[in-house]
Amino acid sequence: MSSPMDLSASYPPELSPEQKQHLVSTVKDWCIHHGLAVRPPPAFVQGAADPQGVLATNAPVTLFPSLFPRSCYESAVSVQKTYNELYASISGNIDWLGEIIEDLVDVDDFVAGLWKVHLAVKSEGYVQPLSLGLFRSDYMVHKPQSSLEEAQLKQVEFNTIAASFGGLSCLVSALHTSLLSSPTGEPIVYPSHPALKGNLPPVNTAVPALAGGLAAAHKAYGPSKSTPNALPLCILFVVQAGERNLFDQMELATCLTQSHNIPVFRITSPEILELTSIPESNPSRPIIYTPPYSPSTQFEATTIYLRALYGPQDYPDEASWKARTHLERSAAIKCPTVLSQLSGCKKVQQILATEVGGPEMDYLTRFLPNTEPTKIKQIRATFAPQYDLSVGGRGRELALNPETAANHVLKPQREGGGNNVYRDSIPAFLQSLPEKDWKGWILMELIQPPPAKNVALRSDGQVLSGDVVGELGMYGAALWKENGELLHNEQGGWLMRTKAKDSDEGGVAAGFSSLDSILLF
Ligand code: ADP
Ligand code: MG
């Protein structure tokens, strides 16, 4: 029996040219056959080559599942429901959250815009007390090379809006499972390796868990609020115009229609004001969707699932802010509300990770009053050191000294990848900003994942092999009342993304990483 270290040091096994050719062509075809696909990136297929937008290609995927320490996977599963509860509680603690956000509004226009939406709806009065969160907590394994300690699970970030890839992630698990399966117990498309023998990825329930959250919200909404005649109910997905990752979203929509019998419609964020309305005469503020291709059949949206509006790029003009306010003031259950989106700010994560006072006087205990201390300890163990950049503080010292900056990442209040500043670039970057803006950024110690290798098939057909870093996302679904009381709280499914070791950023959609699955060891 080989030790875990030997297992990962020799993984994945070397492919012969014939094996590689067969594996690539099998994966390529499997992806299109099962919808593990994206619309092609413009760098691969230019508009002129596909003027009608009919083409799709495989999502970037790894040829091998990655090895992942079982203990870390189990920790991520076991803390997810508590994490759901924590963020539900934070978005219900408006005074605490508001104090943090109000400190950001003068340095961050985007956060300021969101806060303004909340204040506008608050002054009119919210009509929907329920919030839905489809969360994803992202982690890396921390195992510095010099350290003999066990691998530790460390959180990269907690996503409260538009957490993507639940749909495609289930398909990658299915892809790797099919490649590993064989009548003899020894996979035949892969070279022999002990890690691959009789081993399959853990069951991935991301699609039923995320769709189950949306269905729970739909049900909790109750009957139509439209007058004088009730309208049929639906769930509305708000997506970006030109979304290339639509097949991922469609996995959730298909599950909602097929398993829950709930109609789902997709609209793009620029279409919100055109295709939805709130009757002024109805104080309950139901939001009505009129399909442009069938204007006589109107639907009332119970739930609005945002896969757009998470960053400044989706708010090009005043109308976009008006559209967000329009959604927020409606009776539909929002996934997420503005407050829940704001609770996912990097600043909130930094504050949670910064211990205040003794162990009995920290925010985790405050927001999770009924949680066992061992669970709180488990959550706290997932935090990597994080700092603000206040005058005279440790964060400022670490960020400005090139030697210590080299072990850190600097993050603004943004989502979706491509916004961070890494390592040696931090001191000069900070010095290029007016000092009064520094409070919009947080400093985080770099997590150091153990060495690993894999082979990826990119969307343009390139096959890349080399040193990689993996990031595990754990999905959660929660529905809660204004006071944070949970009506639905589920952990469900996971996502593995694998990127080249020399790339700092991690997004698949942003073009940095590939979808992967895991084998536990
Ligand atoms: P975003 O909201 O843009 O996704 P993240 O916090 O997830 O921001 O950072 C983007 C990427 O940067 C991550 O996917 C990961 O690859 C890398 N990263 C972020 N924080 C750390 C960290 N503490 N250690 C190592 N890598 C990190
Ligand atoms: Mg991220």
Image (tube, grey):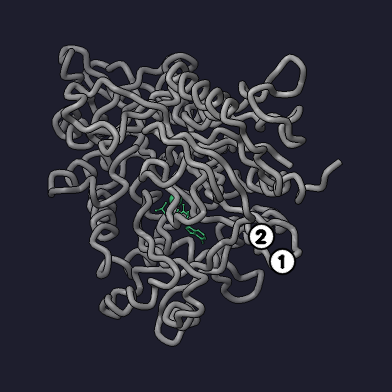
Q: Residue at x 62, y 58 (%)?
A: 382
In-image side of 25 versus 177 (left or right): left
Horizontal and vertical percent position of residue 118: 28, 52
Q: For mark 1, give the secondary structure.
A: loop
The amino acid at mark 1 is: Ser
Quarter residue 379 falls in? bottom right
Instruction: Note whether 395 is above or below 312 in the view shown.
Output: below
Name the disc covering residue 510, or none. Answer: none
Q: Residue at x 68, y 60 (%)?
A: 377
Horizontal and vertical percent position of residue 21: 53, 26
Q: Quadrant of the N terminus?
A: top right
Between the C-alphas of marks 2 and 1, the distance is: 7 Å
Extreme residue toward the front, this view: 17
Task: Report if residue 85 is visible in the image.
Answer: no
Residue corresponding to mark 2: 143
The front one of 356 and 475 is 475
The amino acid at mark 2 is: Lys
Quarter residue 10 falls in? top right
The 10 Å Cα crowd at callout 1, few under 14, some 14 to 19, many 20 or more, is: few
The front one of 354 and 251 is 251
Q: Quadrant of the C terminus?
A: top right
Q: Are marks 2 and 1 in contact (CB under 8 Å)?
A: yes
Horizontal and vertical percent position of residue 114: 27, 54
Q: For mark 2, give the secondary structure.
A: loop
Q: Residue at x 25, y 69 (%)?
A: 106
Q: Residue at x 55, y 23 (%)?
A: 22
The 10 Å Cα crowd at callout 2, few under 14, some 14 to 19, many 20 or more, is: some
Residue corresponding to mark 1: 147
